[in-house]
Amino acid sequence: MERWSNALWTLLTPPAHRQHHPSELVRTLHRECDDGALILDRERILVPNAFVVELPPQAHHQLTVNSGQLGSHLSNQVRQHAAEHGYTFAGPVAVHLVPIQGDDIARFRVRSSIAPIPDTTMEEPDPHYG
């Protein structure tokens, strides 16, 4: 995990900013939870559970080519943060790393949303029936 964290930091930060701690992405995911929190009642605070981390193409390739587990590691970090703050989710936590084209992103960008559990009880109607 430390190797991923260091590689992630190296790829996502310009050289002038590398003196900061390599967990900036994790802190950004935590902040997305905190900023997107919805108070449902006195004991339930709903937070985003679907995160998209937009990366420059080179950073995305280098982070995902050797391991598909970085998204799982980041999801675990979000779940741990939520447990510490008493947050709840509408569905499973997922962090997806995606490449983004263009010059408007130098490091990374995070988008989040609240995504409910998919309803698997609703099946497609059988075209051969009825």
Image: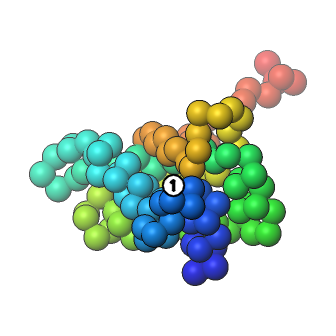
Relative placement, left or right, of 103 versus 27 is right
Residue lying at 59% horizontally and 39% vertically, measured from the top left: 105
Q: Position of residue 65 (x, y in %)?
A: 81, 63
| Front residue of 26 and 81 | 26
Q: Which residue is mark 1?
A: 92
Residue located 16% across and 46% down the image? 41
Furthest toward the top, the residue is 130
> Tag 1's secondary structure?
loop
Percent x, y of residue 9: 57, 65
**In front: 4, or 30?**
4
Q: How many marks?
A: 1
Is residue 2 found left or right of 32 in the rendered image?
A: right
Q: Residue at 70%, 55% (x, y): give it.
A: 59
| Residue 40 placement (x, y as % from top left) | 21, 43
| Residue at (17% x, 56% y) in the render | 43
Residue situated in front as seen by the camera: 5 or 70: 5
Q: Quadrant of the N terminus?
A: bottom right
| 122 relative position to 66: left or right | left
Quick check: can you spot residue 75? no
Give the class, few, some or many, for how many residues have Cα within 10 Å of label 1's Cα (few <14, many ≥20).
Answer: some
Q: In this orientation, does residue 19 appear?
A: yes
Can you tell which quarter of the image residue 4 is in?
bottom right
> Amino acid under label 1?
Pro
The quadrant holding residue 81 is bottom left
The image shows residue 37, relative to residue 68, as above or below, that is above
**Direction right: furthest residue:** 128
Where is residue 102 drawn, in percent x and y? 68, 32
Q: Residue at the left extreme? A: 42
* Of residues 39 and 13, the one drawn nearer to the viewer in this rendering: 13
* Image quadrant occupied by the C terminus: top right
